[in-house]
Amino acid sequence: MSDETPDPAPGTPADFEASLEALETLVARMESGELGLEQSLEEFQQGMQLVDRCQRALDEAQRRMEALTTETSGNPEAASGTPPATDDDDPVPF
C-alpha cells in the first residue's frame, strides 16, 4: 500500500492546482541556474506538459461555465436568483 495521494483527474480544478504548483516548482528550479543544459531541456519538456494540463483544466472549467450559462439563459429569474413576479407584487389594486 502506498502513502502517495492519487493524481487528480485530468481537467479538474484539483488537477489544475496540482499542475500549477508543480509548474511553479519547476520554474523555480530552472531559474536557480543550477541545472545543466540536458536537465533544463527535460524540465522544459515537463513544464510544457504541465502547461498543457493546466490549459485543459481551464478549458473544462470554461465549458462547464458556458453550460451553466446556457441552462439559465432561457430563464432570467433563475440566472438572477429573483423569484418570478406574482399578482401579489402588482402595485395596481385591480
Image (cartoon, helix red, strand yellow):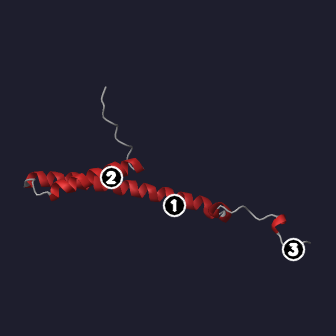
User: Which amino acid does the dot numbered 2 rest on?
Assistant: Arg
Residue 83's label in the rendered image is none
Query: Furthest residue to the top?
Result: 1
Q: Indicate which disc, 1 or 3, sits on the residue closer to the N terminus.
A: 1
User: Which amino acid does the dot numbered 3 rest on?
Assistant: Val
The N terminus is located in which quarter?
Answer: top left
**Residue 75 position within the rendered picture, expressed as x and y whole percent measured from the top left:** 66, 62
Rendering quarter of residue 79: bottom right
Residue drawn at (74%, 63%), measured in percent from left and top?
A: 84
User: Which amino acid does the dot numbered 1 rest on?
Assistant: Glu
Front: mark 1 or 3:
3
The C terminus is located in which quarter?
Answer: bottom right
Q: Indicate which disc, 2 or 1, sits on the residue closer to the N terminus.
A: 2
Separation of residues labelled 2 and 3 (CA atoms): 58 Å
The residue singled out by tag 1 in the image is 66
Front: mark 2 or 3:
3
The residue singled out by tag 3 in the image is 92
